[in-house]
Structure formats: structure tokens, C-alpha cells
Image (cartoon, rainbow, N blue to C red):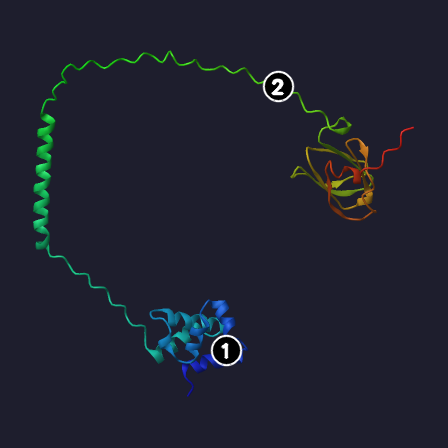
Amino acid sequence: MASFGENLRRERELRGVDLREIANATKISVRFLQALEQDRVDVLPGGIFPRSFVRQYAKYLGLDPDRMVTEFDHVYGAEPAVPKSAVPKRRRSDARPVLVVAGLLLLAGVGFLAWKTSRPVPAAAGAQPSAVLPPPSSFPPDRVYPPPTPTPNAAPAAGGVQGLVLVLTAKQDCWTAVQADGAKRLDRVLKAGENVTLNAQKEIVLSVGNAGGVSFTLNGRPGVQLGREGEVRRNITFTRDSMASLLQEAPPPR
């Protein structure tokens, strides 16, 4: 008749499962799993650990954990009861001398404190009354700082426009989503002929569902064609650094 460990190994091999696979899944050492299959329970840690190992092993293989633990107990015996640690009771008579001594010391301390506080404190000979410090008039008065001079606004960026101003014009119905400086500003279908103006300090990110159905200007300058009709373009990023690649070339001066 096969032993408990042999039955475990047979069930595992029937499923084509490697011990290391069970160890990785259950965090049980391969050495302990081998000990279970070899019926070497003396290698396993004591207490509840062997039954916990059997339960996790069985659960991983799809076996009934309760039935396997019951079979384990039937073969190796139920878990031994953990004896309660015997705490020696201190005899009441041992504490009496300590309490008596502590009480006497407490009474002596209270009496000495009462005697000491009741004695008058002699005034020091020739002691002068405490000098009254003059008000700190010698300290410099609080400085009053003038209000800060308002800093003139920074010079406008190239083209006389601060930040970014994007104007979208829908030539056809077009789903449009816009984020300005990280904040969501638009997410809907623009109708043909509709204009939308969006402002940002640093960055505008545009996504469109019909790249050929929308045109734009950036800071007053016309932009390039975003794509073909029906083409989806996502995350088109407008910054001052990328303006040159997204704008039409300015006509040469006459």
C-alpha cells in the first residue's frame, strides 16, 4: 500500500507539475516538499507547519485540502497540544516585607518634605531688590519695508503674443480632444464651420478623429495640414519649440 507521501507524489506527477513550480507558488521550500513526499516528517518544522504545507500542496494540485490533512493526521497523529508555560506564582508572604519597607520609606519622605517646606527662608544679607529692566528702547525700531516695486510684465514672446493661442476651425464634423498645460479643455465633436480658441502657457496637446477635417492657426499663423480626411491623429503637441514644424512657412518679404 502506498504511503501518504507516495500518494502526494503520484498526484503531482499525474498532473505534470514540478516541485519547484509548487515551491514558487506556495513559498514552501523544495526541501520541505520533498520531505513530505518521502514521508520524512522529522525534517519538517514543528507545530502547525506540516499541516499547513499539506493544505497548500493539496490546494495547488486541486485536491481536497481538508481530506488530505485528515489523512495526514491519521498517519502521523493529531497535532500535539502545546503545553502552557508554567508561571510560578509569587507567594503573597514574599511581597509583604517589601511592601512594609516601601511604606516606611514613603512616610519618611513625606515627613521630611513637610518639615523642609515649613522652615522660613532667611533673607540674604545686603540683598538688593531686583533691578527692574528698562523697556528695550535701545533696540532698533522695527524696519518698515516699502512695498515691492511692481516688476514690469515680461516682454511679449515673438509675434507679440504671450504663451500659446490655438484656434481650431472645423471644415467637417471632427471629434477633437485638447489638453492645455496638462488640464483637459475639450473632448467632443466639433461641427463643420465651428471655431474654438484655446490658450496655454507652455503646451497644448491635440487629438483629432478626422485630421483632414480641421485646420488651425497658432499665435495667429496658419498651421500645416494635420492629415487626410478620416485619419486619426493623437497627441499632436504644440510648444514654442515645436511651432516651426507645425506652421506654414511665412512668405518671403517682397
Q: Nearer the viewer, mark 1 or mark 2?
A: 2
Residue 88's place in the image compared with 7, above or below, is above
Residue 229's place in the image compared with 69, above or below, is above
Residue 154's place in the image compared with 192, above or below, is above
Closer to the camera in the image, 25 or 186: 25
Q: Is residue 202 left or right of residue 6?
A: right
Q: Which kind of residue does numbered mark 2 sit on?
A: Pro
**Residue 107's x, y, as percent?**
8, 38
Q: Is residue 68 left or right of residue 102?
A: right
The residue drawn where x is 20% and y is 64% is: 86
Closer to the camera in the image, 175 or 216: 216
The residue at the far bottom in this view is: 1
Closer to the camera in the image, 84 or 42: 42
The quadrant of the picture occupied by the C terminus is: top right
The residue at the far right in this view is: 254
**Residue 222's x, y, as percent?**
82, 35
Task: Return the disc, 1 or 2, that comes first in the chain's sequence.
Answer: 1
Q: CA distance from mark 1 to mark 2?
A: 81 Å
Q: Secondary structure at mark 2?
A: loop
Q: Which residue is mark 2?
A: 150
**Residue 18's x, y, as percent?**
52, 75
Q: Is residue 217 left or right of residue 178?
A: right
Q: Which kind of residue does numbered mark 1 sit on?
A: Arg
**Residue 28's x, y, as percent?**
44, 69
Q: Is residue 164 left or right of residue 2?
A: right
The residue drawn where x is 72% and y is 26% is: 156
Q: Which residue is mark 1?
A: 12
